[in-house]
Amino acid sequence: MGSHLSDVWFRTTDLEVVSGSGCMVYTADGAQYLDFTAGIAVASTGHSHPRVVDAIREQAGQIMHAQANCYRNPRPEQLATRLAQITPSSIDTFFFTNSGAEATEAAVKLARYATGRPNVIVVQGGFHGRTYLTMAMTTSKVGVRAGYQPLPAGVFATSFPRPYAWRVDETTAVERALADFRLLLGTQSAPSETAAFVMEPVLGEGGYLPAPVAFVQGVANVCAEHGILFVADEVQTGFARTGRMFAVEHSGVEPDIVVMAKGIASGFPIAAIGARADLMARWHRGAHGGTYGANPMGCAAALATIDVILDEQLVIRSAARGRQLFDGLRDLQSRHPGVGDVRGLGLMVAAELTNADGSPGTARTNDILAHCLQAHHLVLMSCGADSNVVRFMPPLVVSEAEIDQALIAFDSALTATSP
Ligand code: PLP
């Protein structure tokens, strides 16, 4: 008899993984693999970090579900206090959900509710989730939206600066993208009807493209001028992933709302939005909620995760290991044809593959992933609209030797697939 499990998930591998530790995952037949996906940038503290496991165990023995409408419980309060200490200084009040998409929706709901304005602006190439609203906000790959149209109205996409793709320098790309944003405000979504601008500080699914600092600052200035809320979707970039606790810190911009998930709790499904207290106070009691939001299990996992990030200095380690990986990939780029671009921040690093005629190297990217998996037991994923970007997002506890191991595997894959 066939499987009773839906086949809707695309699969990067068919590995039957039964356990994990640090950067390693283990299959049912006893093989081990070096996981440079971290479960799509989630297992930042490594798989099943003992402190996180202990915290979850202990909480499960106390109470698993102290529903937020029914009871108060110390854990959400403790987590909110902890988050206020580590998020950008503008952010001090928090609301919890279960997934990144729900958190992004919550950010938009808060922005619309608090400003009374209907529209949101996103950037071309952004990814915000799979629910109907977040699909409408997602333009990283058409497959995310195909088969589901029409999507909710009131979402407008403006350009994201792409110096490599546009073959221009960064300053020119930023000027062009900021001009497009102003044009959009003048032609499609009036500032008085625009509640928020929502952007990932590094485009994740869209191709691991860091937003130039001047773009983030330029967007934030235009938003401030018009009373548009600046929302940083830090679902993939947050919690030390980019060598800072939050990626928006690279620009010095203080966002109005931060969206968090993935790395927040080492794999336990919990997500959050943070905002200024005065903004959060405009969200009236009962205007939003959810059965599982702020559940003590997720909060305990997140509290332990944040302790590990701080105690094991994962911000510094992410920056250092990220630099090693980036330099290593740049070196490979200089020795192999077809590596068009190497880019990233911290441990969110990618190599874009191109064919000799400059077209996206999609088939080669698939061959590289397969070679790394089969010949080197290294698990990698691709991203970008054409799936021609190999992304490296290992757990932040990755060692120097493991980064070298991944570089050796990638080197070998580039040789094996050389055009
Ligand atoms: N926002 C960003 C930047 C993401 O990368 C993702 C997931 O990849 C989401 C939102 C959606 O998060 P989730 O899959 O937890 O709903």
Image (cartoon, grey):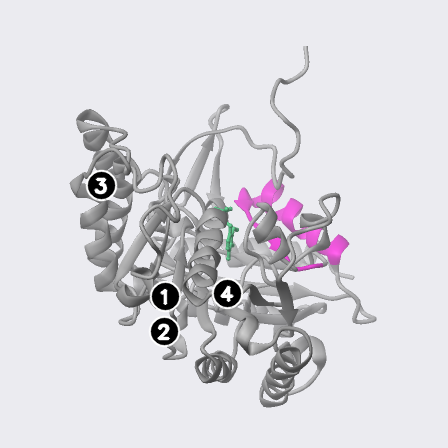
Between disc 3 and disc 4, whose residue precedes?
A: 3
The disc labelled 4 sits on which kind of residue?
Glu
Residue at the spot of label 4: 200
Residue nearest the observer in this picture, 120 or 87: 120
Q: Nearer the viewer, mark 3 or mark 4?
A: 4
Q: Earlier in the sequence, mark 4 or mark 1?
A: 4
Residue identified by numbered label 2: 249
Q: Is residue 336 above or below residue 82?
A: below
Q: Please determine whether, in this image, residue 336 is positioned above or below residue 289.
A: below
User: Where residue 328 appears, x then y in whole percent?
Assistant: 51, 68
Q: Quadrant of the C terminus?
A: bottom right
Q: Is residue 324 visible?
A: no
Q: Nearer the viewer, mark 3 or mark 2?
A: 2
Quadrant in the picture for the N terminus: top right
The residue positioned 27% from the left and 48% from the top of the image is 305
Q: CA distance from mark 3 to mark 4?
A: 30 Å
Residue 149 on image: x %, y %: 73, 48
Q: Position of residue 288 (x, y in %)?
A: 39, 47
Q: Residue at x 66, y 45 (%)?
A: 370
Quick check: is 369 in the magenta stretch?
yes
Q: Is mark 4 within 8 Å of ligand 1?
A: yes
Q: Find out if the beta carbon at label 3 lies less than 8 Å from the nearest ligand 1 atom.
A: no
Q: Say left or right for 54 vs 7.
A: left
**Label tally:** 4
Type of residue at label 1? Phe
- Closer to the N terminus: mark 3 or mark 2? 3
- Residue named by callout 3: 51
Classify mark 1: helix, strand or loop: loop
